Amino acid sequence: MKNTPIDAADRVLISSNVFTGTEAQARPAFVAIRKDRIVAVGAPDEAASWIGPDTEVHDLKDAFVMPGVHDNHVFFTGYMSMHRGIDLSSTRSVEEGLQRLLDESKKLPPEQNVYAFGWNREVWGQAPEQKLLDEHFPGLAVVAINDSKSYCWMNRAAEERYRFTPDQCSAEARALLLEEMMKDKEMLKQEFLDFCTMLAGRGVTSIKDIGFDRYEGLLPVLNELEAAGELPIRVHFALEPVLHPFDMDAGVDYKQRYNSDKLRFQGYKLMLDGVVADHTGDMLEPYADLPGVTNLRPVDYAPIEEAVLLADSHGIKCCLTAEGDAAIRRAVDMLEQCRRRTGQTVRHSISDLEYPHPDDLVRMGKLGIFAEVYAQILLLNPSHDAAYMAEVAGEANEYRFYNYDSMLKAGVPVTIGTDLPLFMTSVPDSLYAASHRRFPDGSPAEGWYPEFGMPPHEVLKAWTINGAEHCYMAESTGSLEPGKYADIAVFDRDLLKAGAAEIRDAQVILTLAAGKVTHNHTGIMRGSYGNS
């Protein structure tokens, strides 16, 4: 008769492909879990010592087991606004869209403004006219954002109320609208829980969420969920000043109040330049297609630098969003000045990093500045032929875009975010774009500058342990090691070996957050297969 372990695990996962995050390869292994923690990781033939009569044992065959995913740059409010109101995705014309708005608005309480989403200009065959909404909704504000998040069909009442125009669809531009949407706390709570469920289906167990100003809309909901033990994922949050000036008092207060393993303050996000693709990224040399122009929207760096230095003096980190090489250089300058002034090693970061100068990557590595890259970024371009990089920077400089290899060689700690809803979190898509270096149509066949891509195991580390390190959580999560939280994602195939043709088909079949099942695609966690 088999001896029963005194301290048996609650669950044991066994697979031939376990990526712990501490090595470059996956290997056959088991992961034993008790309550919310990993208690053992080892060779499959050692699993029996952790199995008791009530242990759930799950033979996952060759499924790919890895640490739970941390998305290091998301906007919940942006996602919320893309799913709030009337769904126009199935409409085929402007007339049908308008009728849907009219029909659904009659079901709303009197005086409630109308939100909608999902319409497609190509399907409609034309851009909808503002006057249609002005005529049919004279007393209400109407905002209907399209499926590409690039244009809002809105009436004049909405423009006056929310102070943005139809072609200004960034989350920052829509800040007043988002503030209004968050006033319904019960709806907001359910939307956030639905958001967490969606992310769990993508293997996510932790996020860094960007909130505007004092984060006053969502923070009460997060407080309530954490107090009730119902917060499904770890939420790290950063403040971005949009409607109000930079607020140091809020940061000092939040640093003291929010430092638990479930809800933690992570500093500030500060915008520097715009977007290289539309020539608002700040460049050291003129754009190849706009001679003499280095930026169509000049940046006032002085107040940004002042805010960064002030935050650093309080030991509070900043994420500086910079795309062009001039903006990236100024960001590095600011953070280097912080180090000289205080000597502190605050885990500051630079996000986007679309077109860095190689010299500044070396400086980032020496200073320990974290990178927050959007590894799915190539997927914004339908094909290699349609990509804008060579056009704006010149063919000789095209390789400098998204040069992950240079980042890694410079010792830059790389984390991955999505700027969600710009992208939906997808580890497979990030491998397709950042490792295989393909555009959505599969071009080019040999990959786009494949020598400057990110090796698959580095992509997975950037999604996991590196993000945990950046958020001061590496001692508790980010890798599969005894003593850490059982934050685990399981995919249906080996992510390290899958080719470009199949990697985007990979699916999450199981997600555990602190030992709790948050996603179970195939029902593999039902029933017990324990030994007795």
Image: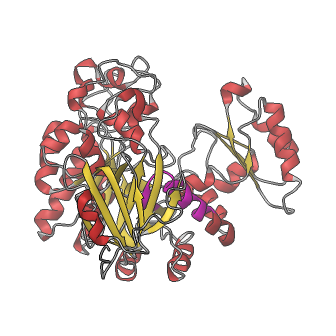
Q: Quadrant of residue 318?
A: bottom left
- State left or right for residue 35 relative to residue 286: right
Q: Residue 349: horizontal and vertical position, in percent? A: 27, 56
Left or right: where 400 falls relative to 500? left
Of residues 416 and 212, the one nearer the viewer is: 416
- The residue shown at (30%, 66%) is 477
- Viewport quadrant of the C terminus: bottom left
Depth check, front residue: 176 or 477: 477
Whether residue 204 is situated above or below residue 432 in the rendered picture = below
**Residue for point 49% across, 46% down:** 424
Q: Is residue 207 magenta?
A: yes
In the rendered image, residue 87, in percent from the top left (x then y), is placed at 73, 45
Q: Which residue is found at the position 39% from the left and 81% from the top?
A: 253
| Residue 55 makes an appearance in the image | yes
Q: Report the label total.
A: 0
At x 31% / y 30%, what residue is drawn? 436
Quarter of the figure that contains the N terminus? bottom left
Percent of width and height locating residue 388: 39, 24
- Report whether residue 473 is seen: no
Residue 372 higher or lower than 239, as above or below: above
511 relative position to 369: left or right: right
Magenta-colored span: 191-210
Residue 452, located in which quarter of the rendered image?
A: top left
For the residue pair 519 and 147, the one nearer the viewer reads as: 519
Residue 276 magenta: no
Counting from the top left corner in percent of width and height, residue 237 is at 42, 66
For residue 220, above or below residue 268: below
